[in-house]
Amino acid sequence: MKKNGTKRKAIEKQQPQEEEEEEEEEAAKKVVTKPKAAKPVRVPKPVVQPDYFPDKRNLEDLWQQVFPVGTEWDQLDLVYQYKWNFSNLESAFEQGGELYGKKVYLFGCTEPQLVFLNGQGKVTVIPVVVAVESPFPPSDKIGVNSVQREVEEILPMKQMKMDWVPYIPLENRDSRVERLKSQIFILSCTQRRAGLKQMKLDRLKKFEYCLPYFYQPFKEDELDQSTIVSIIFPAEPKPVFTEFDWEFDEVEEFTDKLIEEEELSTDQKEAFKNFLKEKVREARKANREAREARKKAIEEMSEETKAAFENMKFYKFYPVPSPDTPDVSDVKSPFINRYYGKAHKVL
């Protein structure tokens, strides 16, 4: 009995183990093998192309730094509405150029002209740069004159807040100015546009009528030695504007003609004749004094200064043609102003 009971217990113990093993096998069959997760695909980063900015030329802003003397304040923005190309001015200072290694003084001016861009004509304010090759400043004065002004004035530059200052090329902008031996000087104006509102009209207009002044002692000024006198006679009901040439005109005959043309009334004849004679005397005296001053200046001048005046040269630079600016080739002129006369070379 004991023996059979032990055997039965052994069989009962074995059956649960077999059942567990069968269940594990069944469960194993039901397990679905999960596929391995796919590795993320690496998307290459887009290659960013670096921005390339053309290197600025050493004298690229030279023409912009030169003050355009005599330009109306409300016209200044029009001067810079185009990106004018003055590479001809820049190359003049490079080796082999007209101004290489020379001491030069630059001033700007503007010339309103009808020019064409993309086949369309438009009156455009053209910037021009004048270069004076000289060992010393050509002048420290400014002329103020216009058709509207009765009297011409020759003023010190500093009175109009103008002066010759050294131009610093871009590659030297970080250097100490006093250590640089500049060969390029520009006419600069420190008057700020913000201060114009507080300025009196007459003072404001003086800036617009400014002309760079130059006195050449070896060349007789044609205007100083002219025999023509401009007359503004304060008659009623309106002033008489005329010109009298004392070399060809006769006072009595000239006055009678004005009366005949009803420019002058008969009762003002004697007053006009006296006024005219006085203006002629003043003009003759001015001519005589100008000749004497010129003669004295030459006598007191050193040989070095004489040589400098005789060798002084003027260059007039216009913008070179470019796709984005009007073509000014047909409007170039050698004339600078009444003081400087004509340029030796136009570029």
Image (cartoon, rainbow, N blue to C red):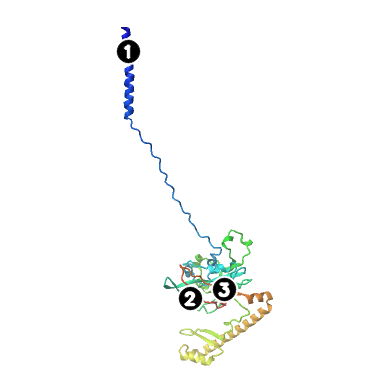
Q: Is residue 162 visible?
A: no
33 displayed left or right of 126: left
- Image coordinates of residue 80 in percent, x first then y, are 48, 67
Amino acid type of the residue tagged 1 in the rendering: Lys
Tags 3 and 1 in contact by the CB under 8 Å rule?
Answer: no
- Image coordinates of residue 204 in percent, x first then y, are 51, 71
Q: Residue shown at 48%/91% (left/top)?
A: 257
> Which quarter of the rendered picture does the C terminus lie within?
bottom right
User: In 3D space, how far apart are the residues under numbered discs 3 and 1 (Cα atoms)?
Assistant: 128 Å
52 displayed left or right of 186: left
User: In 3D space, how far apart are the residues under numbered discs 3 and 2 (Cα atoms)?
Assistant: 18 Å
Q: Residue shown at 68%/79% (left/top)?
A: 299
Image height check: is 17 above or below 239? above
User: Upstream in the sequence, badge 3 or badge 2?
Assistant: 3
Amino acid type of the residue tagged 3 in the rendering: Tyr
Of marks 3 and 1, the one in the foreground: 1
Q: Is residue 272 visible?
A: yes
SS label for mark 3: strand
Classify mark 1: residues with Cα within 10 Å, few (<14), some (14-19) or many (20+): few
Of marks 1 and 2, the one in the foreground: 1
Classify mark 3: residues with Cα within 10 Å, few (<14), some (14-19) or many (20+): many
SS label for mark 1: helix
The residue carrying mark 3 is: 315
Taking depth in this image into account, of 41 and 256 the one nearest to the observer is 41
The residue carrying mark 2 is: 330
In the picture, residue 309 is in which quadrant? bottom right
User: Upstream in the sequence, badge 3 or badge 1?
Assistant: 1
Residue with the most extreme top position: 1
The residue carrying mark 1 is: 9
SS label for mark 2: helix
> Which quarter of the rendered picture does the N terminus lie within?
top left
